[in-house]
Image (spheres, rainbow, N blue to C red):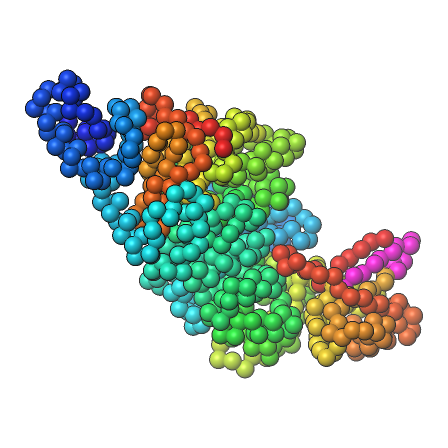
């Protein structure tokens, strides 16, 4: 019960608790709540607590506490004031400001902070160099991927990550310039490529190209959507010859935020899980993100312009499920 | 290079009945359970050669000696010849230890997918006990990549020679040029003008050429004799231990002895050891090479790559115009022009006669520039045969006069063709 309480972060008035579980346990829970109040207060704000209004989705209290401390310590080292970063644009500006100060940058992999060159403002997101794109690996294994056609832009910095996923899944990759669709099509026809990893825009165009050229091989699609351009209708599109399709929403290029397990992908679902590197708080309809302390500049309660509702029923894989709304 | 004994083992290996059928078909063993062997250099030289065109119709799964699940990644031929792409599998990165003479690879590297994939660079870094981090270079978005490279602390570069200008300008913007200590250049000839730009921009870098091809799994094809220093018109290479290189006459296919001064089309036999997806035996890569009189300490012969046989050599009546010859002549006029150029050949067929107009696009250093006068100078200097200049042909009416004009801009994302054919 104590563990359950710790996991749920429920601040329930003692009177109500007494009614639920008895006086003795209620007193204990209230003592715990008082102990955790200094930590919980920044998260809870001034909102009156209700049973269903606040859930911390991913990690036990003790781990969250440790992670928060480490994140705050990093911010202190980098001279970042937490209250400077309230929304995603402010966070990106901070990334730009502090990137030269990050110690041991060589131990990280750097990703651009924009999905397109037009939106690039000069910052880089640093993630530990031993981080791996596990969700991609899961999809490659589940779908029976053999040749993987990589049509994501090179500047996204994802080639090594895709390679490691392929290696563990028994697949091989080919970097196909997205503007060169004929080569990609011939690769499918002649070189055993049955899986495509690409952007949502390109998936549509390449799918049309394949259909126009009567390419009938069954294909697996792993489609990456940028956080600033979530289009649920595009997720419902049927791509050419689809055998398996998985969608991901990335916070930055190469940084998954909303992911699908193989259950959701096989079901051609438009439901998502939150990537394990992030935790999500919902507060009065808005979403804030906290990242992983292993990132060089982790997100800490950064609000993002995404609407998501949590489904009541969990996924067969055991994780919470969300429905995203368009940005 | 591979000894005859090793080559014989290789031939026996590739013709074993359980392996890919390609060589069995090539050597006429299709319906036989026999393997093949060679016991003399004469027998070796009688083995059939093959080209990329022979491989294109074959599915990669049929060509590969390995199950596809064991392949690391795939390369595709560039398609500059206009033919369908050939997909060539790769296994492990090997045979690049020579680079450690020039750089320690302890810091991140800015790399394109050529000559080595970013994940291969990371593997090499790990082998050196360093953290494995690369920044992938995107020629469509050089500035973003240059910025990421400057922030993460890249000190090495590895990509196509024709990317260097756009990468250089992008890195200059982020004041990250003096930090670069190693530059690896692949994918063609580095003109004198481009070399001077690289030297000027990256003053602290050692510049090492890389000779590879998408069809050859065991790259590089030759180990560079020394870093580029501007003294050689073309980079100098030596054969690797895991290769056997030969020359054949481009027209007759006859074997050419690799003595200094010899020229011919290059044949590659390569086997880096197991695992190997596609061992090559007497593969005609399509490059024209020249054997040099080497003064270095390397034991095998030295060679230089003159260009692509089908792209960099233009046959004309009674002679040939070679791209490397045009480059040589342009360097004679280095006060007037750079050695960047494009030669456009306009052919008009009339019955069995071919009427050819040659137009050479050059990059003048001065304005105004007398293109007509310069064209006359070029005619006198361009050799089309051992004892014959282009002007000799003009004087007897065999050739039309050359014309010159200003070369068009190159955005740096694609390799510039040196000889362009137009059929009217």
Residue nearest the viewer, comparing B235 with A200:
A200
B193 relative position to A73: left or right? right
Q: Is residue B273 magenta?
A: no
Q: Quadrant of residue A33?
A: top left
Per the rendered image, the range of residues in magenta is: B343-355
Q: Quadrant of residue A204?
A: top right
Q: Residue at x 56, y 74 (%)?
A: B199
Residue nearest the viewer, comparing B270 with A6:
A6
Residue nearest the viewer, comparing B243 with B40:
B243
- Number of marks drawn: 0
Residue nearest the viewer, comparing A251 with B255:
A251
Judge whether A222 appears above or below B390 on screen: above
**Magenta: predominant secondary structure element?**
strand
- Tell which residue pokes out farthest to the left in this image: A24
Please indicate, yes or no, whether residue B6 appears anywhere in the rendered image. Answer: no
- Tell which residue pokes out farthest to the top in this image: A19
Image spot of residue A170 (x, y percent) = 41, 41
Judge whether A166 appears above or below B181 on screen: above
- Tell which residue pokes out farthest to the bottom in this image: B295
Image spot of residue A156 (x, y percent) = 49, 48
Judge whether B335 appears above or below B315 on screen: below
Q: Residue at x 44, y 60 (%)?
A: B151
B299 relative position to B264: left or right? left
Image spot of residue A107 (x, y percent) = 35, 57
Q: Is residue B352 magenta?
A: yes
Please indicate, yes or no, whether residue A306 appears anywhere in the rendered image. Answer: yes
A89 relative position to B317: left or right? left
Q: Residue at x 42, y 63 (%)?
A: B153
Q: Residue at x 29, y 48 (%)?
A: A71
């Amino acid at each position: 019960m104590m563990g359950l309480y710790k996991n749920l972060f429920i601040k329930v008035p003692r009177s109500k608790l007494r009614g639920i579980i008895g006086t003795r346990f209620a007193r204990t829970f209230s003592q715990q709540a008082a102990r955790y109040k200094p930590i919980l207060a920044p998260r809870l704000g001034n909102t009156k607590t209700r049973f269903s209004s606040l859930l911390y989705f991913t990690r036990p209290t003790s781990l969250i506490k440790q992670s928060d401390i480490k994140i705050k310590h990093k911010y202190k080292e980098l001279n970042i004031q937490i209250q400077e970063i309230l929304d995603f644009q402010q966070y990106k500006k901070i990334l730009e400001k502090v990137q030269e100060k990050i110690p041991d940058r060589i131990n990280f992999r750097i990703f651009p902070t924009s999905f397109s060159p037009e939106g690039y403002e000069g910052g880089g997101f640093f993630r530990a160099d031993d981080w791996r794109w596990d969700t991609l690996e899961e999809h490659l294994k589940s779908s029976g991927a053999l040749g993987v056609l990589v049509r994501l832009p090179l500047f996204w910095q994802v080639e090594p990550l895709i390679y490691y996923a392929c290696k563990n899944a028994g697949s091989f990759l080919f970097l196909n310039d997205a503007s060169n669709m004929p080569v990609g099509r011939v690769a499918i026809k002649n070189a055993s490529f049955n899986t495509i990893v690409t952007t949502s825009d390109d998936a549509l165009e390449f799918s049309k190209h394949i259909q126009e050229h009567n390419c009938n091989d069954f294909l697996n699609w792993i489609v990456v959507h940028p956080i600033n351009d979530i289009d649920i209708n595009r997720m419902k599109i049927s791509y050419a010859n689809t055998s398996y399709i998985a969608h991901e929403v990335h916070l930055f290029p190469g940084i998954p935020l909303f992911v699908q397990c193989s259950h959701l992908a096989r079901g051609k679902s438009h439901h998502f899980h939150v990537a394990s590197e992030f935790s999500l708080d919902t507060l009065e309809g808005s979403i804030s993100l906290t990242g992983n302390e292993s990132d060089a500049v982790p997100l800490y309660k950064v609000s993002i312009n995404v609407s998501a509702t949590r489904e009541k029923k969990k996924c067969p894989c055991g994780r919470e499920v969300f429905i995203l709304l368009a940005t | 290079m591979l000894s005859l004994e090793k080559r014989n083992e290789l031939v026996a290996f590739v013709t074993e009945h359980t392996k890919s059928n390609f060589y069995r078909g090539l050597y006429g063993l299709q319906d036989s359970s026999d393997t093949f062997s060679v016991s003399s250099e004469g027998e070796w030289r009688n083995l059939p050669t093959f080209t990329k065109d022979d491989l294109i119709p074959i599915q990669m799964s049929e060509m590969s000696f390995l199950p596809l699940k064991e392949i690391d990644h795939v390369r595709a031929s560039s398609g500059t010849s206009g033919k369908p792409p050939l997909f060539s599998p790769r296994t492990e990165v090997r045979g690049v230890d020579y680079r450690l003479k020039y750089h320690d690879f302890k810091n991140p590297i800015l790399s394109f997918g050529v000559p080595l994939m970013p994940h291969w660079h990371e593997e090499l870094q790990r082998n050196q006990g360093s953290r494995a981090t690369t920044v992938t270079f995107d020629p469509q978005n050089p500035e973003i990549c240059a910025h990421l490279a400057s922030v993460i602390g890249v000190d090495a570069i590895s990509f196509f020679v024709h990317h260097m200008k756009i990468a250089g300008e992008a890195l200059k913007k982020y004041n990250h040029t003096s930090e670069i200590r190693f530059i690896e250049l692949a994918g063609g000839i580095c003109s004198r003008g481009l070399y001077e730009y690289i030297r000027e921009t990256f003053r602290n870098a050692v510049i090492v050429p890389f000779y590879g091809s998408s069809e050859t799994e065991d790259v590089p094809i030759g180990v560079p004799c020394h870093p580029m220093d501007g003294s050689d018109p073309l980079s100098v290479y030596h054969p690797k231990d895991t290769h056997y290189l030969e020359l054949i006459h481009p027209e007759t296919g006859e074997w050419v002895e690799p003595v200094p001064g010899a020229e011919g089309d290059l044949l590659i036999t390569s086997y880096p050891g197991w695992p190997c997806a596609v061992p090559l035996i007497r593969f005609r890569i399509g490059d024209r090479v020249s054997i040099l009189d080497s003064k270095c300490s390397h034991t095998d012969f030295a060679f230089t790559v003159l260009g692509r046989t089908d792209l960099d050599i233009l046959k004309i009546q009674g002679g040939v115009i070679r791209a490397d010859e045009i480059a040589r002549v342009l360097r004679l006029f280095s006060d007037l022009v750079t050695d960047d150029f494009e030669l456009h050949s306009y052919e008009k067929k009339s019955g069995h006669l071919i009427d050819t107009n040659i137009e050479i696009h050059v990059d003048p250093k001065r304005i105004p520039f007398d293109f007509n006068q310069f064209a006359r100078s070029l005619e006198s200097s361009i050799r089309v045969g051992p004892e014959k200049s282009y002007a000799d042909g003009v004087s007897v009416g065999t050739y039309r006069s050359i014309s010159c004009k200003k070369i068009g801009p190159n955005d740096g994302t694609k390799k510039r063709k040196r000889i362009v054919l137009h059929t009217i």
